[in-house]
Each structure stands twice: as C-alpha cells, then as structure tokens.
Image (spheres, grey):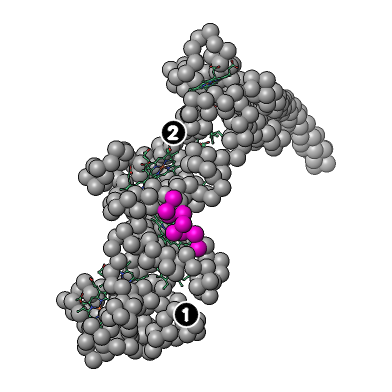
C-alpha cells in the first residue's frame, strides 16, 4: 500500500531529510549529513511495512536530534538514490539491518551506553540503561535466549520513540501499567512461566493505582517505581523489598526500631508486604490491629502472648481517640450550624486529628508506651474541643434565654407605653374640650 496522505508525504520527508544537525558532523556517521536520504525516500515508496517506519519516525526523539535510519540500521543513505536498494543497504558500508530480538539491548546500547557520544546531545541523560537492564530478570533471561521478556523496544517502541517525560510515551508514569500489562496481564503469553498475571488488575484497584490513574497523582508509584526502570530495583535499594521506605520514610524507620525487624529478617519475611501486600495495597483500617476478625496480628500471634496484648491495647488507644474526635467534631458542628463562633474548637480538632495520623504511623514501632503517649495528647485536644463545643452551646442557650426575657420585657414595656399614650391622648382631648368650651 502506498502512502495515503499527500500532504504528509511532502512534509515528513522534508523533516526527515532537511533537519540540519550541527552535532552530526562530528558524530559516528558523517555521511548522513547529506541532505538527501535514500533510506527515507525509497522506503516511502515501498509497501506498508517498509514505509511505516518512515511515517512513525516523524515525532521520534531521534529524528528531533537529527538522527535517521542509517544511524541505527547502518548503511549508506547517500547511495541508492537511483533506486538500487543494495547500494544503500550494503553490509560493507556498515549496514546491520534488523537486529535479532536478543541483540536489541546492545543495538540501542551502542549509543545509550556511550557517555561521550550521548553528552553531545544531552549531558544530563543517564547512560546506565543497558548495564542495569542486564541485571534485571528481563535482561538475564534474554541473555539466556528467552525472547518473550521485555527488551528496550517493548517498553519504548521502535520507530516513534518519545522522551520518557512526554505524557504520550509508553513509559510515562500513567501509561506504564498498560505497557507492562501487554505481557504481564496476558495469561496465554505468560503461560510458560510460574508467576501470576494479576499484578496490573490488583494494582489498578490499590491505593497507589487509584491515586496515580484516577487522580493523576504522580507521587504514587507506578510499576517502575517499585521495580526499577531498567534494573531489578531502583538505585540505592538492594531489593524491591526495601522500596516502600523510599516514600514511606517514617513507617520504615519505625519498623526498623520494632521487634519485627529481626523477627521478620530471621524468617525471610518482607518488611511491609507481609502486612500490606504488594500490588493490591489497600487503605489500612484500624481493625487490622486488635484481636477482632479483621486483625492481621492474629495471623501470627495467639492469645496469651505479649504481642496479643499489645495488639489489643493499640486498637483500643486508636479507637478511643477516633471516637473522641468524632464526638467532639459532631458537637462543634451543631454549634457552628447554630451560628456560634467555634474557630478555636476546630483548631483543637485538627490538632487531635494530627495525633491520630501520627498514632497510625507509630504502631509500626510496636511500642505500647509511645502510642499511649501520643493518643493521650490527641485525647486531650479532642476533650478540649468537646468542652469548647459544650461552652458554645451553653452560650447559645444563655443567649436564647436572654432573648426570651428581653422579649417579654419589651412586650410589657410596649403595653405600658400603649396605655400611657392612651392616657395622654385622653388628657389632650379633655384639654381640647376645655379649650373649646
Ligand atoms: C532503493 C530503495 C531502498 C533504499 C535506498 C533503501 N532501502 Fe531499505 N529496503 C528496501 C526494500 C525493497 C526492502 C525489503 C527487501 C529487503 O529486505 O531487501 C528494504 C528493507 C529494509 C530493512 C528491513 C530489512 C529486513 O531484514 O527486514 C531495513 C532495516 C532497511 N531497509 C533499512 C534501510 C536503510 C537504513 C537504508 C539507508 C541506508 C535503506 N534501507 C535504503 C528498499 C530500500
Ligand atoms: C532508534 C533506532 C532506529 C531508527 C532511527 C530506525 N530504526 Fe528501524 N528498527 C529499529 C529496530 C530496533 C528494529 C527491530 C524492531 C523489532 O525487532 O521489534 C527496526 C526494524 C525496522 C524494520 C523491520 C520492520 C519493522 O518495522 O520492524 C524496517 C523496515 C526498518 N526498521 C526501517 C527503518 C527505516 C526506514 C528507518 C528510518 C526512517 C528506521 N528504521 C529508523 C531501530 C531503528
Ligand atoms: C545512533 C545512536 C542511538 C541509537 C542507536 C539509539 N539511540 Fe536513543 N537516543 C539517541 C540520542 C542522541 C537521543 C537524544 C537524547 C535526548 O535528547 O535526550 C536519544 C534519545 C532516546 C530516548 C529519550 C530519552 C529521554 O530524553 O527521555 C529514548 C527513550 C531512547 N533514545 C531509546 C532508544 C532505544 C529504545 C533505542 C534502540 C531501539 C535507541 N534509543 C537507539 C541516540 C541513539
Ligand atoms: C521494562 C520496560 C523497559 C525496558 C525493557 C527498557 N526501558 Fe528504558 N525506560 C523505562 C522506563 C519506565 C523509563 C523511565 C520513565 C521515567 O523516567 O519515569 C525508561 C527510561 C529510559 C530512558 C530515559 C533516561 C533514563 O534512564 O531515565 C532511556 C534513554 C531509556 N529508557 C533507554 C532504554 C534502553 C536503551 C533500553 C534497553 C537496553 C531500555 N530503555 C529498556 C522502561 C524500560
Ligand atoms: C514483552 C513482554 C513483557 C513486557 C512488556 C514486560 N515484561 Fe516483565 N517479564 C516478561 C517475561 C516473559 C518475564 C519472565 C517471567 C519469569 O521469569 O517468571 C518477565 C519478568 C518480570 C519480572 C520478574 C518476575 C519474577 O519472576 O519474579 C518483573 C518484576 C517484571 N517482569 C516486571 C515488569 C514491569 C514492571 C514491566 C513494565 C515496566 C514489564 N515487566 C514489562 C515479559 C514482559
Ligand atoms: C508498591 C510497589 C509495587 C508496585 C507499584 C508494583 N509492584 Fe510488582 N511487586 C512488588 C513486590 C514487593 C513484589 C514481590 C517481590 C518479591 O517478593 O521479591 C512484586 C512482584 C511482582 C512480579 C513477580 C510476580 C508476582 O506477582 O509476585 C511481577 C511480574 C510484578 N511485580 C509486576 C508488576 C507490574 C506489572 C506492576 C504495575 C502494574 C507492578 N508490579 C507494580 C512491588 C510492587
Ligand atoms: C513512589 C513512592 C511510593 C512507593 C515506592 C510506595 N508508596 Fe505507598 N503511597 C505513596 C503515596 C503517594 C500514597 C498516597 C496515595 C493516596 O493519596 O491515596 C501511598 C499510599 C500508601 C498506603 C495507604 C495509606 C493510607 O493512609 O491510606 C499504604 C498502606 C502504602 N502506600 C504502602 C506502601 C507499601 C507497602 C509500599 C511498598 C511495597 C509502598 N507503599 C510503596 C507513595 C509510595
Ligand atoms: C505487622 C504488620 C505491619 C507491618 C509489617 C507494616 N505495617 Fe503498615 N500498617 C499496619 C497496620 C495495622 C496499619 C493500620 C493502622 C491503623 O489504621 O490504625 C498500618 C498502616 C500503614 C500506613 C497508613 C498509616 C500511615 O502511616 O500513614 C502506611 C502508609 C503503612 N502502614 C506503610 C507501611 C510500610 C511502608 C511498612 C514497611 C516499612 C509497613 N507499613 C509495615 C501494619 C503493618
Ligand atoms: C507474619 C507474622 C507476624 C504478623 C502478621 C505479626 N507479627 Fe508480631 N511478631 C512476629 C514474630 C515472628 C515475632 C517474634 C517472635 C515472637 O515474639 O512471637 C513477633 C513479635 C512481636 C512483638 C514482640 C513480642 C515480645 O514478646 O516482645 C510484638 C509486640 C508484636 N509482634 C506485635 C504484633 C502486632 C501488634 C501485630 C499486628 C499489627 C503483629 N505483631 C503482626 C510475627 C508477626
């Protein structure tokens, strides 16, 4: 099939051919600075599969940097303008052709792992993708000949690669889950492997997935924030197990100070995942503490153990604070609706809420004393607010009583005044009569 859009047919080759690149003259392929590019012009004339790459390259980051077909595939773009493919796609002129799947990482890494070369274009761009990729499960399996794993082009595309921070890029945070889903959510494709295919589905329902995909909150992790862009785990993190602490610093620090730290390490249990899961992480409930049916503590601890007591006590502390805040808040709202001034009470409630938030974090230390201290302070604030709410309502009642009394007083006054006026009126009538007499 030939190209359907005559306009694009003029514009695209002009772009691909005409971009003058000041850097290119020093780069690996001096010949490609020729304004006419046989790869582009001939391929545009060819059937769909051969023309498609030319069209797809229009918005490609490589095109924007003045790179073209021969920079990746090799060959001589100044030859073959007369219509001889072999003259351009000549292995003696460096033509590589299409790389085998197993060779793709080296194919891209030829430039991307060369700091000197890349610096000419973008000094800030990391050049560690290939090295890291080799340490990932994808990279290790590919090296072993497994062609089903992800290579560079499965995540970035082949022709039409965009900058990673371009919101249309398949590796842009909000698009990452679907990029991984292409394989990881495909049961048939993953049938050869002994791993589940529910990560994306679970993730989409999780607190993280909801925050990123529904609310566009890029502070929440996409797949790559926990698994790394290229390597097995992000920089400075020895394993995906420790990745939560990068964002949840306080929880992680408190966990490190808890008796679970050594206990979990001994049994090879992951720090956070053991209680929260990984892909389907939900908004935690207070009932995960305690000794009720939703308690996670009871999965490992039994009645009679110290930990059982701790679990029960922690729940009571948090639940009492939560209830106290609820009561104070409800009362203050009534006063507010009645038009009373409750600014101070609302400040106290918001202070109490801060203590509740801190309490839910400090449980990770498993220290009953520290939780109790916090929850008591929170309780004090909640009681303060409650007392202020009561005071506001009493004041309101007082004002209402005052209003009633003054209303009665005014009525009495009005009646008195009425008689007084009548009396005066009568007197003046008499006087008029007298005068008239
Ligand atoms: C005169 C026309 C013509 C020119 C010039 C030309 N090609 Fe091709 N190209 C073809 C045709 C026809 C095919 C399909 C047949 C084949 O594989 O030889 C092809 C195939 C390819 C393939 C796919 C090969 C495969 O194994 O599937 C690549 C990659 C390619 N060309 C790159 C280039 C590059 C890079 C240049 C410039 C240096 C170039 N072509 C110049 C006509 C051309
Ligand atoms: C950034 C490097 C890069 C550039 C630039 C590039 N290609 Fe490719 N091309 C590849 C890779 C990698 C593959 C193999 C993809 C795969 O196996 O999935 C490929 C595959 C191909 C194929 C085989 C069919 C296909 O689509 O997979 C053709 C034909 C081709 N390229 C032509 C071109 C032409 C023509 C240009 C210039 C307009 C070009 N390429 C520019 C990297 C590049
Ligand atoms: C001929 C050298 C060369 C080859 C081969 C090459 N690239 Fe590039 N690539 C570049 C240059 C130069 C840039 C531009 C850097 C910039 O502007 O940030 C770039 C940019 C990129 C970017 C955007 C980086 C960013 O700023 O977010 C990605 C992604 C990328 N390349 C992926 C690939 C992939 C995948 C392959 C293999 C299919 C590949 N590249 C092959 C030279 C190359
Ligand atoms: C499993 C998917 C995946 C594979 C495979 C992959 N990348 Fe990436 N790549 C990403 C993600 C995700 C990002 C970062 C997006 C971001 O910054 O948020 C990225 C970013 C990049 C960037 C921008 C600079 C940087 O490092 O952040 C370049 C360049 C790049 N990749 C090249 C490559 C090359 C070359 C390969 C093959 C050796 C490759 N990628 C393999 C997913 C992948
Ligand atoms: C082209 C298909 C493909 C794509 C796209 C892909 N993967 Fe994979 N991935 C695989 C295959 C196949 C394996 C090997 C499974 C195995 O060894 O158990 C794998 C393995 C993994 C593993 C290791 C699983 C284990 O065994 O512990 C992780 C983690 C992983 N991928 C994450 C990702 C993430 C995150 C993305 C997206 C950024 C992604 N993958 C994109 C195919 C893909
Ligand atoms: C909040 C961090 C986090 C996010 C986000 C995340 N993962 Fe994971 N993932 C993990 C942890 C932790 C494991 C378990 C690793 C271990 O035990 O070694 C895991 C395991 C995996 C595995 C191995 C098989 C399995 O299910 O145990 C695959 C594949 C995987 N994740 C893919 C993905 C994909 C695809 C996404 C995006 C939809 C994603 N992950 C998002 C943390 C995360
Ligand atoms: C890239 C940063 C990042 C990483 C990595 C990360 N999280 Fe989160 N997490 C967030 C953000 C941001 C939120 C808040 C989402 C929201 O607004 O609902 C959150 C929310 C949560 C919540 C819910 C908190 C609440 O009050 O509802 C839990 C539990 C959680 N993460 C646990 C984990 C665990 C366990 C891991 C590791 C497996 C992890 N997170 C990895 C950023 C991260
Ligand atoms: C022993 C089980 C357990 C472990 C291990 C655990 N958590 Fe929690 N986590 C909980 C419980 C229970 C709650 C709910 C407390 C509440 O709401 O009363 C919670 C609440 C949270 C919250 C929401 C409250 C807050 O602090 O904002 C986050 C976030 C969180 N955990 C992250 C983590 C991270 C990160 C790790 C690993 C360092 C971790 N948790 C380890 C049991 C655990
Ligand atoms: C995955 C299993 C597991 C879960 C879930 C778990 N723990 Fe533990 N916990 C342990 C292990 C193992 C130890 C160390 C051995 C022991 O004392 O039982 C421990 C120790 C403790 C200790 C120290 C006990 C002592 O004697 O000093 C406390 C306190 C504790 N856990 C509280 C909790 C609370 C509260 C929860 C629920 C939020 C919880 N644990 C959930 C496994 C778990």
State left or right for residue 187 relative to residue 336. left
Q: Who's the residue at 46% across and 66% down the image? A: 112
158 to 235, vertically: above or below: below
Q: Is residue 49 visible?
A: yes
Q: Quadrant of the N terminus?
A: bottom left
Q: Is residue 310 left or right of residue 179?
A: right
Give the residues in magenta.
127-135
Q: Is mark 2 within 8 Å of ligand 7?
A: yes
Identify the residue position indicated by label 2 in the image.
277
- Give left or right: position of 261 versus 391: left
**Quadrant in which the C terminus appears:** top right
Give SS at disc 1.
loop
Q: Residues within 10 Å of mark 2 (few under 14, many from 20)?
A: few
Residue for badge 1: 27
Count of numbered circles in the view = 2
Mark number for residue 287?
none
């Amino acid at each position: 099939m030939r190209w359907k859009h005559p306009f694009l047919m003029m514009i695209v080759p002009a772009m691909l051919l005409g971009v003058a690149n000041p850097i290119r003259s020093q780069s690996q392929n001096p010949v490609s600075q020729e304004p006419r590019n046989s790869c582009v012009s001939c391929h545009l004339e060819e059937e769909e599969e051969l023309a498609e790459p030319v069209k797809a390259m229009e918005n490609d980051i490589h095109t924007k940097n003045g790179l073209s077909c021969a920079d990746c595939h090799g060959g001589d773009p100044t030859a073959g303008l007369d219509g001889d493919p072999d003259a351009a796609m000549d292995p003696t002129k460096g033509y590589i052709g299409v790389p085998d799947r197993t060779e793709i990482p080296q194919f891209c890494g030829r430039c991307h792992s060369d700091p000197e070369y890349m610096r000419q274009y973008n000094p800030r761009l990391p050049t560690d993708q290939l090295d890291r990729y080799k340490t990932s499960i994808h990279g290790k399996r590919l090296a072993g000949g497994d062609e089903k794993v992800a290579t560079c082009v499965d995540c970035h595309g082949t022709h039409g690669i965009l900058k990673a921070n371009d919101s249309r890029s398949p590796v842009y945070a909000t698009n990452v889950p679907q990029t991984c889903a292409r394989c990881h959510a495909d049961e048939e494709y993953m049938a050869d492997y002994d791993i589940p295919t529910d990560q994306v589905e679970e993730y989409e329902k999780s607190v993280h997935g909801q925050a990123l995909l529904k609310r566009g909150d890029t502070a929440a992790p996409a797949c790559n924030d926990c698994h790394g862009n290229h390597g097995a785990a992000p920089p400075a993190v020895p394993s995906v197990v420790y990745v939560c602490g990068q964002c949840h610093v306080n929880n992680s620090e408190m966990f490190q100070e808890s008796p679970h730290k050594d206990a979990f390490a001994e049994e090879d249990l992951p720090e956070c995942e053991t209680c929260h899961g990984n892909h389907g992480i939900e908004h935690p409930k207070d009932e995960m503490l305690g000794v009720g049916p939703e308690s996670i503590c009871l999965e490992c601890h039994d009645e009679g153990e110290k930990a059982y007591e701790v679990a029960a006590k922690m729940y009571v502390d948090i639940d009492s604070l939560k209830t106290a805040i609820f009561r104070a808040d409800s009362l203050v709202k009534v006063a507010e609706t009645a038009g009373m001034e409750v600014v101070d009470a609302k400040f106290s409630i918001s202070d109490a809420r801060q203590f509740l938030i801190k309490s839910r974090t400090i449980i990770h230390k498993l220290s009953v004393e520290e939780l109790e201290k916090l929850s008591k302070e929170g309780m004090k604030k909640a009681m303060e607010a409650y007392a202020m709410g009561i005071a506001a309502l009493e004041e309101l009642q007082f004002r209402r009583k005052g209003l009633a009394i003054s209303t009665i007083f005014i009525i009495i006054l009005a009646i008195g005044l009425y008689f007084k006026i009548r009396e005066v009126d009568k007197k003046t009538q008499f006087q008029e009569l007298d005068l008239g007499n």
